[in-house]
Image (spheres, rainbow, N blue to C red):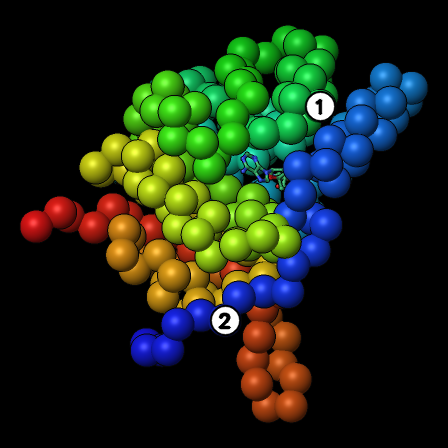
Amino acid sequence: MVDSPVEELESSELGTKEYWETSYETEIQNYKSHGDVGEVWFDEDSQLRIIKWIEKQEALICQDDAIIDLGCGNGMMLVELAREGYSDLTGVDYSPRAIELAQAICTDQDMCITYKVVDLLDRTDVMTLGKFKIVHDKGTYDAISLHPEDSKSMRESYMQSVDQLLKDDGLFILTSCNWTQLELVKSFEKHFSLYQVIPTPSFTFGGTVGNVVTSVVFSKKTKQ
Ligand SMILES: C[S@@+](CC[C@H](N)C(=O)[O-])C[C@H]1O[C@@H](n2cnc3c(N)ncnc32)[C@H](O)[C@@H]1O
């Protein structure tokens, strides 16, 4: 375990709401004109790996357990979960355009998924959502970490939101391309313990083994 605090990432426009609104505006136009659902972050394989992992936890996770996708974008993770039979699905994103796109795809596919415009850094918004057995995030913590202003306190407020949303016996599944497994464990240790690592493809460079994306599963720390 590393004792030093994790280093902040260099900020980027991917950390701003304006970037996502503009990006989903284009994706809505593409969807309307030729049915392209848009980007699935870190590709469909990483999505599939997570869904397969969830399916293997049948002793812990039932198909009617409440699942929320944080920063759901076009909602394709939830669409795939619905296809596999999961029925209590919620997607939130702070971009109204993302939610508009996700809702359009959901309606066209005749699926029942709840979508809401929610800023995960707004406690009042988050408090209205309830509790979930699975809290899932693919790429959203990464985006928040890239915010140009005070991303450190934003990351902390994101963690408090996840803590608020997760049931005591729930699992938080996080996929990141910006943080290593060690950094994620260190950053989240105040609220969560590492439960499992979902294996992702690795590469070796100069004798060091690395991963393009990291998928970790956390459980809630029991309060003393
Ligand atoms: C890299 S994209 C990932 C989208 C989707 N999860 C996927 O895997 O395809 C990051 C998403 O996080 C959303 N997001 C960023 N900050 C957020 C916040 N504070 N509250 C809610 N959503 C946020 C963005 O609008 C965007 O849809």
Residue tagged by mark 2?
7
Vertical placement of residue 60 versus 177, above or below: above
Who's the residue at 52% across and 30% down the image?
Answer: 119
Name the one closer to the observer, 205 or 82.
205
Query: For the residues marked 1 and 2, what is the alpha-carbon distance in whole angstroms?
Result: 32 Å
Secondary structure of the residue carrying tag 2 is loop
Q: Residue furthest right?
A: 33
Q: Quadrant of residue 31?
A: top right
Who's the residue at 42% across and 19% down the image?
Answer: 88
Q: Quadrant of residue 101?
A: top right
Residue 9 visible in the current orientation: yes
Vertical placement of residue 90 versus 156, above or below: above
Vertical placement of residue 124 versus 134, above or below: above
Where residue 11 sits: x, y (%)? Answer: 65, 59
Q: Residues within 10 Å of mark 2 (few under 14, many from 20)?
A: few
Residue tagged by mark 1?
97
Name the one closer to the observer, 83 or 34.
34
Q: Say whether mark 1 is within 8 Å of ligand 1.
A: no
Vertical placement of residue 91 versus 113, above or below: below
147 displayed left or right of 158: right
